[in-house]
Image (spheres, coloured by chain):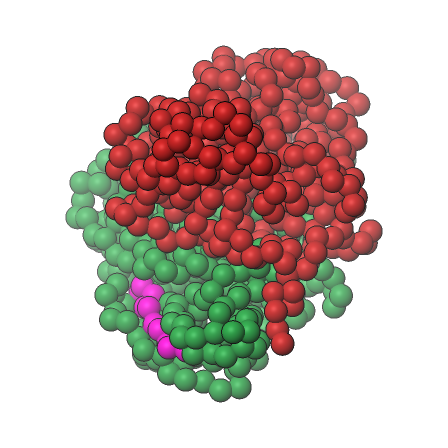
Chain colours: A red, B green
Amino acid sequence: MTTVDDVSRPSRLAAADEAISVEELQLAARNHGIPLEALRYDVTPAGLHYLLIHYDIPDLDPATHALTVDGAVDRPLTVSLAELRERPRVTRRVTLECAGNGRALLRPRPVSQPWLVEAVGNAEWTGTPLAPLLREAGVAPDAVDVVFTGADHGIERGVEQDYQRALPVTDAMREEVLLAYEMNGAPLLPQHGAPLRLIVPGWYGMAHVKWLRSVTVRTEPFDGYQNAVAYRLRQDADDPGVPVTRIEPRALVRPPGFPDFMSRTRVLRPGPCTVDGRAWSGHAPVVSVEVTTDGGATWAPAVLDEATGGDFAWRGWRHEWTPGPGRYVLGARATDASARTQPVEQPWNRGGFANNLIQRVAVVVLPE
Amino acid sequence: MTTVDDVSRPSRLAAADEAISVEELQLAARNHGIPLEALRYDVTPAGLHYLLIHYDIPDLDPATHALTVDGAVDRPLTVSLAELRERPRVTRRVTLECAGNGRALLRPRPVSQPWLVEAVGNAEWTGTPLAPLLREAGVAPDAVDVVFTGADHGIERGVEQDYQRALPVTDAMREEVLLAYEMNGAPLLPQHGAPLRLIVPGWYGMAHVKWLRSVTVRTEPFDGYQNAVAYRLRQDADDPGVPVTRIEPRALVRPPGFPDFMSRTRVLRPGPCTVDGRAWSGHAPVVSVEVTTDGGATWAPAVLDEATGGDFAWRGWRHEWTPGPGRYVLGARATDASARTQPVEQPWNRGGFANNLIQRVAVVVLPE
């Protein structure tokens, strides 16, 4: 008899010499990162923001969609999308990054969505704050977790599930957390959670539950798959690990010059070049960015652009560079106000999460 | 001394046991296909249409962008985007497919953008017809090719170039060919060629030049890279081959049920299920679609939806299926009015182009 266990395997690490599998390629072909030249836009245009969809994009009708608030509350609520749109309206610029960004560069490689460095985007999310709605429902004094359930349904490592992620109640009550129905001034696109999603500024993407249909308050810790099994930092399969939460600092270089189609190596003519990019952290504002052109041997400070997007949006930076002919490896290192920075050695864990290893951009400067 | 030849290699085939390389993965992470569940939409929403960008997305200013028409014409023209928008306005629904769709499934595998089956989309393109503009310029009676040049710049297989593709003059003069400035009713997105691109209904994607800045009429055949070297059907590296032109027929199944995250295997409960999808051909209208649930051993006719999108848009189809528990492999086969259909054996060529091998969707129907 054929069962779920025949189609869904436990998580695993790739063997030392194991290249990218067809299963990993399937995920890379449907999900996508930001093309790095799109780091030129402070607000990422539609279709260029990174996308990670665990199962299928559901087909929801905005005209009938409603959000339930239930569990350990005094007054369970059901609120239509139209009613949510009539509540106080807030727009926040927020950088979202997939917790698995950089996974495919790790050794050994955790076998999952094979991101290199590009699983990021910065958008303007419009919606209504969650906290007042929870206060209206009346959260129980002994509540510990708030579970957010999406309409996307599938199987993961043998467990059939709707996508569900919980936040500790204190995080769910942060005033910045939004029930968002617009992105960049337009109704949410299907792939970004239409008609309603959660936005949790500062946290990795797994917390920003898409296609949101219920909010359930619990007085016991949530032990669902995405909290208890996936999205934990652990060193081996038996390690209970700690939850993935806020975004570690990262800077990305917008690759200068022009590319070779196949290798994506960057080619420049000799002479002055402005190297620029974006930097972000979910823990605290970015306070400095350093740039290397020799693969990390030496570093120079970058000039930070004005911080115009608030505490949870990426920040532009630039560095003037005048290379002669030869080969270079560019990278950038962000440091935030909590003194967190990016490591030169890979910060490995079994899920490949929260890995903020410094990017390497190969550049060839041609002869005069 | 470091030169272009150090960063750009000749085209090649993967070895028999060679898995996907990091270079192929880099392309898969930035370009992307349509998530197959989005076959539910007759018009593909923004951000879900497939995308293949050879170099970088250029940054063009619509306020100053202009198109030049020159070469073997009586009256060379320069036309601003604003002037193009004042010309007769036409909207056409057109299915675009990458010529390399299916490449990563070929054996041996041509090493390039590693598409599986998902490099397709169907959009409404609005613009002004090209032919009247060419007539106003006065095409020389001995003209043979019309070269379209984009603003995207890079290196490919050792050749530094702006992206350029030519059409035979008779194809360029087809009334359906558009200079398009809108997609799905909105200004073109950067990644789809903003502010101006060519649309050549019926042809593979390489002909629909994005970021279009010039149209040059020639009295000699165009020997640029994308016509003379890339995008040719050839059996080996020495074969001069024939040009890639119109889209071969293909049908895709919208995968039923729900997926396992990692394997993307589809899971269903037993009972009635409507299997549906889309079918298209650039040669002639699709006249039939057949469905298999046993990997091609037997076929049943699908019911075609009404053809509402014109001759160059995909057409919906559906098939009622009531499976019992077990394993199935679904696929569909399109046939067009020119009697072209899809092969069961791979139609191999060295570039992996115009490959319309039948899709295989693995489905598990669970026990009752």
Whether residue A345 is visible, yes or no, is: yes
- Kindly indicate the quadrant of the structure image that contains residue B92: bottom left
| Picture residue at 31% right of the left edge, 63% below the top | B313
State left or right for residue B359 relative to residue A62. right
A218, above or below A340, in the image:
below
Q: Residue furthest right?
A: A16
State left or right for residue A52 relative to residue A176. right
Viewer-closest of B54 and A166: A166
Q: Is residue B319 magenta?
A: yes
| Picture residue at 70% right of the left edge, 56% below the top | A10
Viewer-closest of A161 and B134: A161
- Kindly indicate the quadrant of the structure image that contains residue A265: top right
Q: What percent of the width, then of the height, locates residue A262?
A: 63, 49
Q: Is residue A315 magenta?
A: no
Viewer-closest of A198 and B196: A198
B169, above or below A204, in the image:
below
| Picture residue at 19% right of the left edge, 48% below the top | B89
Overall secondary structure of the magenta section? strand
Q: What percent of the width, then of the height, locates residue B154?
A: 56, 42
State how many labels appear. Answer: 0
Q: Residue furthest bottom?
A: B298
B20, above or below B325, in the image:
above
| Picture residue at 41% right of the left edge, 38% below the top | A70
Q: What percent of the width, then of the height, locates residue A29?
A: 55, 54
Quadrant location of the N terminus of chain B in the rendered image = top right
Q: Which residues are magenta?
A: B312-321
Q: What percent of the width, then of the height, locates residue A215?
A: 44, 38
Whether residue B141 is visible, yes or no, is: no
